[in-house]
């Protein structure tokens, strides 16, 4: 299999507080507001990758609870697995990877993120146990 025919896999977590707000980060590398997450390493499980990425980007410890969506960026070949996670310990704060952290309402998510990223949160907040499967171009759903 050639390198060009391989996909990259990323993981992200939707963490809510008692008010129903979602934890988001402002990435240091591109300034975009997104869920905490990143590239899954070859030698780690999906759950371990979520825990690691959330800790690296927010300083908190979480427990992944369920898969809420699978998203493929058709232009880059990146497949993202999004999971709900519950906060176990710590207070969210900026880190080397995040310039800011915030708790956003669903309305803020819709207004403050591209369609391709905001839908991940909205899908996770739906009251269903069937994961969404969506495709996008990096900005818009296809």
Image (tube, helix red, strand yellow):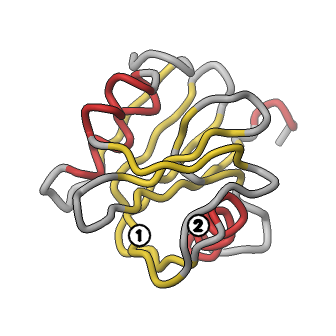
Residue ID at (37%, 44%): 104
Out of 97 and 99, give the one closest to the viewer.
Answer: 99
Residue ID at (54%, 39%): 34
Left or right: where does residue 60 sit relative to residue 129? right
Q: Is residue 133 above or below residue 50?
A: above
Q: Is residue 135 above or below residue 25?
A: above
- Label 2 SS: helix
Residue 50 tag number: 2
Q: Residue furthest right?
A: 3
- Label 1 SS: strand
Left or right: where does residue 54 sit relative to residue 129? right
Kindly identify which residue carries mark 1. Answer: 85
Separation of residues labelled 1 and 2 (CA atoms): 9 Å
Residue 66 in picture, x, y percent from top left? 35, 69
Dot 1 alpha-carbon crowd within 10 angstroms: few under 14, some 14 to 19, many 20 or more: many
Residue 103 in picture, x, y percent from top left? 41, 51
Out of 5 and 109, give the one closest to the viewer.
Answer: 109
Residue 111 sits in quarter: top left
Residue 106 sits in quarter: top left
The reply to whether the C-beta atoms of the residues labelled 1 and 2 are less than 8 Å apart is yes
């Amino acid at each position: 299999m050639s390198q060009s025919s391989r996909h990259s896999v990323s993981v992200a977590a939707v963490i809510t507080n008692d008010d129903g707000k979602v934890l988001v980060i402002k990435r240091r590398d591109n300034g975009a507001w997104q869920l905490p997450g990143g590239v899954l390493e070859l030698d780690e499980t999906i759950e371990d990758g979520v825990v690691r990425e959330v800790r690296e980007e927010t300083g908190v410890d979480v427990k992944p609870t369920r898969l809420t969506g699978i998203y493929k960026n058709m232009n880059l070949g990146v497949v993202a697995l999004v999971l709900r996670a519950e906060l176990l310990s710590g207070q969210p704060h900026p880190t080397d990877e995040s310039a800011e952290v915030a708790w956003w309402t669903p309305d803020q998510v819709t207004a403050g993120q591209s369609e391709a990223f905001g839908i991940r949160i909205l899908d996770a907040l739906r009251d269903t146990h069937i994961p969404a499967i969506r495709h996008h171009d990096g900005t818009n759903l296809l």
